[in-house]
Amino acid sequence: HINNQTKSKDLFMRNMMHELKTPITKAMFIAETLEDEKKRDILQRAFHRMDDIIKELAMVEKLTSNNTFVYKELTSFFRIYKKTVEITMLNADQITSKINDFKLNADTAMLSVALKNLIDNAIKFSSDKHAFIHANMHRVDVISTGEPLKFNLEYYTEPFSQEEKRSDGFGLGLYIVKTIANLHDYRLIYKHQKGQNIFSILID
C-alpha cells in the first residue's frame, strides 16, 4: 500500500509539473511580443518565477522521496547568490549583503533554493522586512531582526510540519535547507543574539 501511494504521488507530481510547463512556456513567448517594455518585463519575470517554482517543486519531490542526486561543480558563492536573488524576486533594498567571494564544489541550483528559503523566511518574519547576508569560505549567515524561535531548530526542520508549526512560518522550507546542507556535508545552525535571528550554513 505504501509503495502504491509513493508511486501515485510521484506520478502526480511529474504529470502536474509537465502540464504546468507547457502553458508557462507559451505565455513566455506571448509576453515577448508585447510592445510595452515595462509590462513585458513584469510578465516575463512572473513567468520565469513560475518556471522556477516548478523546478523547486521537482527538487522538493526528490528530497522527500530520497531520490536525490547532487550535481556538484566548481563554482563561486557569488554565482549562487546571484541565482538566489533572481529567484526570490525581492526588491534590492530588502537585502544587504557582505560577501567575501570564494570557490566551492556545490550544486548551484540546490544551494540557491536553500539560500532563497532562508532569505524568504528572514524577510517575511522580521520586524523591518529586511535581511542581511554575510558570507565567507567558512559560513553563510542570514540575519534578520525579530523575536527568537519558540522551539529549538530541530522542531522546525522536521518534514511536513503540523499546522501549528506552519503557522509560525517555519516547516518544510527549513527541512529543505537542512537536507540540502546535509547533502553537501554542511550544517545548518541557529541562534538569537541581540534581537536578531541568525541562521547559518557552516561550510567547514
Image (cartoon, rainbow, N blue to C red):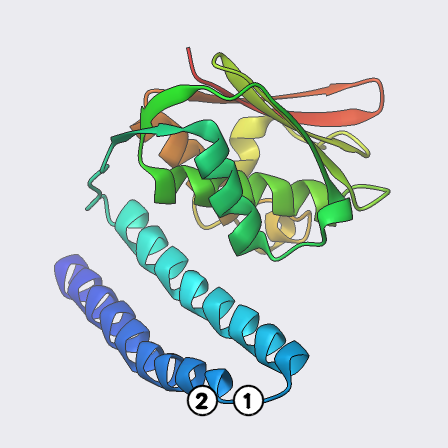
| Disc 2 to disc 1: CB gap under 8 Å | yes
Relative to 41, is 183 on the left or the right?
Answer: left
**Residue 140 occupies which quadrant of the picture?**
top right
Amino acid at dot 1: Leu
Closer to viewer: mark 2 or mark 1: 1
Amino acid at dot 2: Ile
Disc 2: CA contacts within 10 A as few (<14), some (14-19) or many (>=20): few
Q: Kindly identify the residue that appears in the image at 52 percent across and 29 percent down.
A: 154
- Percent coordinates x, y for residue 104 in the rendering: 35, 22
Q: Kindly identify the residue that appears in the image at 44 percent across and 20 percent down.
A: 187
- Percent coordinates x, y for residue 156 in the rendering: 56, 37
Residue 158 in sight from this viewpoint: no
Relative to 157, is 99 on the left or the right?
Answer: right
Vertical relation: 155 (above or below) 195: below
**Residue that carries the numbered disc 2 in the rendered image:** 30
Seen from the viewer's position, the closer of residues 117 and 162 is 117
Callout 1 secondary element: loop
Disc 1: CA contacts within 10 A as few (<14), some (14-19) or many (>=20): few
Callout 2 secondary element: helix
**Residue that carries the numbered disc 1 in the rendered image:** 34
Seen from the viewer's position, the closer of residues 33 and 106 is 33
Residue 155 in sight from this viewpoint: yes
